[in-house]
């Protein structure tokens, strides 16, 4: 059952492994028998009517929002801003004429998000909550709700809820493109199916991820993740996972920013994990990897390219460029898991953290 560990030692590993099934479940839930996207017409209308979407979220859900912005803007040509809930709450930005607020929250209970929802409702704006708990506070109080269908997530560090959020956002992006008559070759359902298969093949490579976690993370005090474009958002999430459960100080950086400061921190043996899935930026990020290696870093690359890399390399199946975050995060989740495990940390219940934070 969803709330038992079964043969797993930790919920986190179980939930990582469940991800391909969750994605396939989402494909089913959001499809009509005729193959068209199944979506409440009022939600479609609300997105269509909005001149700008404001995504509000915290933690891992915020990272899903960053990917959601790319999807919405690139696929559906909808301008999107993504805000950290607690920041928006006390420092509201200038709003567009017809904003739609989209709250992304696994639990649907995050107080920082609720604070924003209460506020924007007072101002008369419409809201949509994307959540894993349909009866939750944010679901009840927003005008519309979309369910992420990931099943109960027990481990404090979010995994399957994050990939589920991105999957739902990709469907929303495709739906919005269609509703506006935008000619797009992006078929979210088909690409999600391929992504699910790709996730599965990465989940089958646990020994590799465990070895990398042992080699890179056992004695280190810090670890850097780098990526560009969509990969930048994924490495922010990869770093958060590692921090949350292994207590290794980790940061996700935009590859091009390294030279503007962070590279000063690179020493002999500093672990650097690079995610390289975005064709148009591949050369630049490979250059960034060489820069850190030249300064002694221990670099490991996650990429779709089988031929180019030397040294440690996690190969992920080649999938649609916009869908890579759903897949490339899987090795990062697994590396964080094994790093925490081998450092003797309490994987499912990290110190100082709560699954949902109901205070501001
Ligand atoms: C807490 C959890 C995080 C989570 C964040 C947002 O801080 O520890 O894992 O990402 O809240 O939670 P939500 O339920 O709103 O997605």
Image (cartoon, rainbow, N blue to C red):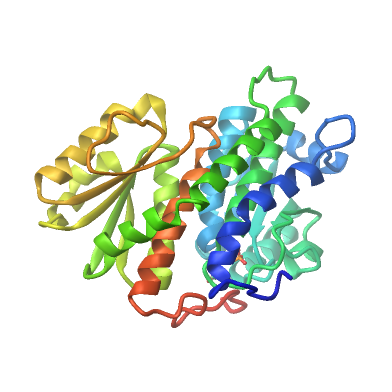
- Determine the residue positioned at 40% across, 57% down: 207
Q: Nearer the viewer, residue 118 or 71?
A: 71
Q: Nearer the viewer, residue 172 or 6?
A: 6
Against 197, is 350 above or below? below
In the shown orientation, is residue 315 left or right of residue 88? left
* Residue 77 in sight from this viewpoint: no
- Determine the residue positioned at 13% across, 53% down: 264
Against 329, is 350 above or below? below
**The N terminus lies in quadrant:** bottom right
In the shown orientation, is residue 59 left or right of residue 137? left
The percent coordinates of residue 265 (x first, y second) are: 15, 57
In the shown orientation, is residue 14 left or right of residue 40? left
The percent coordinates of residue 344 (x first, y second) are: 36, 80
Against 10, is 124 above or below? above
The percent coordinates of residue 266 (x first, y second) are: 15, 54
- Determine the residue positioned at 46% across, 45% down: 328
Task: Choose top left, top right, bottom left or bottom right for residue 217.
Answer: bottom left
Q: Nearer the viewer, residue 300 or 69?
A: 300
Q: Nearer the viewer, residue 44 or 154?
A: 154
Task: Choose top left, top right, bottom left or bottom right for residue 153.
Answer: bottom right
The percent coordinates of residue 351 (x first, y second) are: 44, 82
**The C terminus lies in quadrant:** bottom right
Against 294, is 141 above or below? below
Q: Residue furthest right?
A: 33
Q: How many marks?
A: 0
* Residue 175 in sight from this viewpoint: yes
- Determine the residue positioned at 15% across, 40% down: 291
Whereabouts is ligand 1, in terms of quadrant? bottom right
């Amino acid at each position: 059952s969803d709330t038992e560990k079964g043969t797993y030692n930790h919920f986190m590993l179980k939930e990582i492994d469940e991800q391909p099934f969750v994605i396939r479940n989402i494909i089913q839930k959001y499809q009509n028998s005729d193959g068209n996207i199944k979506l409440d017409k009022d939600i479609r209308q609300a997105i269509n009517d909005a001149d700008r979407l404001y995504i509000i979220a915290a933690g891992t859900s915020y990272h899903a929002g960053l990917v959601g912005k790319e999807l919405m803007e690139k696929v559906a040509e909808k301008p999107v801003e993504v805000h950290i809930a607690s920041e928006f709450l006390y420092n509201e930005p200038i709003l567009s004429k017809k904003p739609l607020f989209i709250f992304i929250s696994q639990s649907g209970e995050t107080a920082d998000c609720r604070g924003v929802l209460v506020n924007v409702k007072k101002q008369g704006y419409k809201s949509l909550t994307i959540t894993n708990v349909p009866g939750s506070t944010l679901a009840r109080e927003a005008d519309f709700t979309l369910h992420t269908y990931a099943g109960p997530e027990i481990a404090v560090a979010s995994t399957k809820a994050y990939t589920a959020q991105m999957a739902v956002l990709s469907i929303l992006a495709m739906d919005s493109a269609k509703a506006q008559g935008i000619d797009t070759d992006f078929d979210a359902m088909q690409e999600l199916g391929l992504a699910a298969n790709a996730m599965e093949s990465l989940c089958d490579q646990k020994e590799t991820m465990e070895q990398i976690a042992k080699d890179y993370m056992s004695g280190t005090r810090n670890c850097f993740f780098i990526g560009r474009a969509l990969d930048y958002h994924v490495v922010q999430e990869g770093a958060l996972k590692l921090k949350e459960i292994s207590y290794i100080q980790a940061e996700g950086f935009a590859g091009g920013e390294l030279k503007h400061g962070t590279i000063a921190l690179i020493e002999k043996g500093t672990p650097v994990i690079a995610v390289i899935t975005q064709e148009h930026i591949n050369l630049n990020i490979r250059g960034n990897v060489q820069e850190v290696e030249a300064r002694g870093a221990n670099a490991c690359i996650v990429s779709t390219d089988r031929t180019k890399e030397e040294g440690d390399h996690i190969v992920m199946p080649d999938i649609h460029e916009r869908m890579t975050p759903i897949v490339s995060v899987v090795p990062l989740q697994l590396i964080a898991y094994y790093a925490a495990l081998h450092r003797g940390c309490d994987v499912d219940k990290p110190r100082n953290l709560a699954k949902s934070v109901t205070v501001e």
